[in-house]
Amino acid sequence: MAATVKYDEVETGQQIPPAEYVVRRVNLVMYAGASGDFNPIHWNERFAKTVGLPDVIAHGMFTMAQGGRFVTDWAGDPGAVVDYGVRFSSMVVVPDDDQGAVITVSGIIEEKLEDKRVVVVLTAKSNDSRVLSKARAVVQLS
């Protein structure tokens, strides 16, 4: 596959429209099984509250994956992401209800590089808190 976004069609400062990703407890249980991270703060409300958390929280790497998903959805090819990194800045609290939590991710083209690559800076928020900081991806466009 190749990226569906064309290098010549993007500009520095261009906004990538936000996307919302709903997170429910079942998603955390599935992620725990896939990742092997069965820490009870990610699925057991009683335990999470015992250790001082407001409720069950999403895995940091699950949250990071939603940023990666945003970039690959935009680029049109998961292989187009050649570098991706974040810092975790806040928790995604996932209540035990039908709505769950929402992670909203948006992006901006920070820089156009050589070889048809761009730097995308991401903003990821949940409940008005920034959950990822210094989130950047280098994407190979066509």
Image: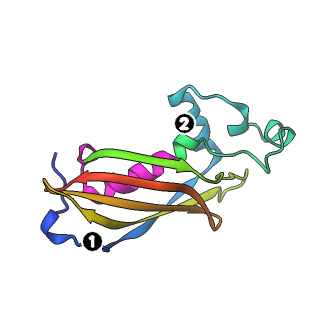
Asked if one can make out residue 4 in the rendered structure from this viewpoint, the answer is yes
Say which mark, if any, is on residue 12.
1
Instruction: Give the residue at the far right of this rendering.
Output: 50
User: Which residue sits at x=26%, y=53%?
Assistant: 139
Image coordinates of residue 39 in percent, x first then y, are 68, 30
Q: How many marks?
A: 2
Residues 86 and 73: in front is 86
Local crowd at mark 1 within 10 Å, few (<14), some, or many (≥20)? Answer: few
Which span of residues is magenta-colored? 64-80
**Amino acid on which disc 2 is placed:** Tyr
**Amino acid on which disc 1 is placed:** Thr
Residue 74 magenta-drawn? yes
Callout 2 secondary element: helix
Image coordinates of residue 38 in percent, x first then y, are 64, 28
Q: Which residue is mark 2?
A: 31
- Examine the residues drawn in magenta and state their main secondary structure: helix
Question: Relative to 33, is 115 above or below?
Answer: below
Q: Quadrant of the C terminus?
A: bottom left
Q: Which mark lies nearer to you, 1 or 2? A: 1
User: Which residue sits at x=64%, y=53%?
Assistant: 92
Image coordinates of residue 16 in percent, x first then y, are 35, 69
Splitting the image into 4 quarters, where does residue 117 fall?
Answer: bottom left
Question: Relative to 26, is 129 above or below?
Answer: below
The answer to whether 51 appears left or right of 31 in the picture is right
Splitting the image into 4 quarters, where does residue 120 fall?
Answer: bottom left
Disc on the earlier residue, 1 or 2: 1
